[in-house]
Image (cartoon, rainbow, N blue to C red):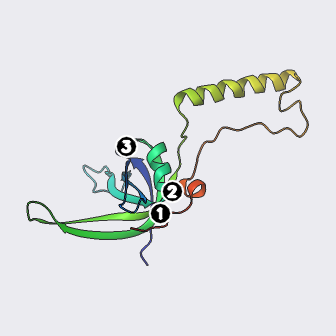
């Protein structure tokens, strides 16, 4: 079985490119806590390259930034190539799905939603008409704290 999953943070902004066939490819580098060698008794992060293909790659490239918290799940692939300096190189990466785990709203959106939530809570406590608590059956719009690329845009559908 070749299945891998991890949770970590992006070490830099994602790299979004397209294949000659037009398929989106998003590449990220993930820092996974406690995966690296321990130095002076302290575990160090491990670093993993991750690629996602298809519509989910476009969403990841648009929404993720350095420091974003994500979960990845996929299979390990190894690649070898000869560089321009005629040196043979190898790399490994996880190819699969990237799921957003952290809040993707901008600071301005978070502040706006927080202010709106405080106002709605105050209205509800005062019993003012139109507040979600004062209107039977009303459901307030809750801020989205986590979004999943795979749920929103489909799975990676690896094709090259």
Q: SS class of the residue under badge 2?
A: helix
Give the residue number, with chain letter if any, for mark 3: 13
Give the residue number, with chain letter if any, for mark 1: 73
Number of residues whose C-alpha sits closer than 10 Å to that of mark 3, classed few (under 14), some (14–19) or many (20 or more): some
Q: SS class of the residue under badge 3?
A: loop
Q: Residue 24's mark?
A: none
Q: In the rendered view, would you say 81 is above or below 149?
A: below
Q: Position of residue 55 (x, y in %)?
A: 51, 56
> In the rendered view, does 60 fall on the left or right side of 77?
right
Residue projecting furthest to the bottom: 1
Asked which quadrant contains residue 35, the reply is bottom left
Quick one: 11 or 106, which is closer to the camera?
106
Q: SS class of the residue under badge 1?
A: strand
Upstream in sequence: badge 2 or badge 1: 2
Q: Position of residue 1 (x, y in %)?
A: 43, 79
> In the rendered view, does 40 fall on the left or right side of 141?
left
Measure the alpha-carbon separation of dots 3 and 2: 18 Å
Give the residue number, with chain letter if any, for mark 2: 55
Do labels 2 and 1 touch, CB within 8 Å?
A: no
Residue projecting furthest to the front: 21
Task: Write the residue at 55% across / 40% down.
Answer: 103
Task: Write the residue at 25% across / 51% down.
Answer: 39
Do labels 1 and 3 touch, CB within 8 Å?
A: no
């Amino acid at each position: 079985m070749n299945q891998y999953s991890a949770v970590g943070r992006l070490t830099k902004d994602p790299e979004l490119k397209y294949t000659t066939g037009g398929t989106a490819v998003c590449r990220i580098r993930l820092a996974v806590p406690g995966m690296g060698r321990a130095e002076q008794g302290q575990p160090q992060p491990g670093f993993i390259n991750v690629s996602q293909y298809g519509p989910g790659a476009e969403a990841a490239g648009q929404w993720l930034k350095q420091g974003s918290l994500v979960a990845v799940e996929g299979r390990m692939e190894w690649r070898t190539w000869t560089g321009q300096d005629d040196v043979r190189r190898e790399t490994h990466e996880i190819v699969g799905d990237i799921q957003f785990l952290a809040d993707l709203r901008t600071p301005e959106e978070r502040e706006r939603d927080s202010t709106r939530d405080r106002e709605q809570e105050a209205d509800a406590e005062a019993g003012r008409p139109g507040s979600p608590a004062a209107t039977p059956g009303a459901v307030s719009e809750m801020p989205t704290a986590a979004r999943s690329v795979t749920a929103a845009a489909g799975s990676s559908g690896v094709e090259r």
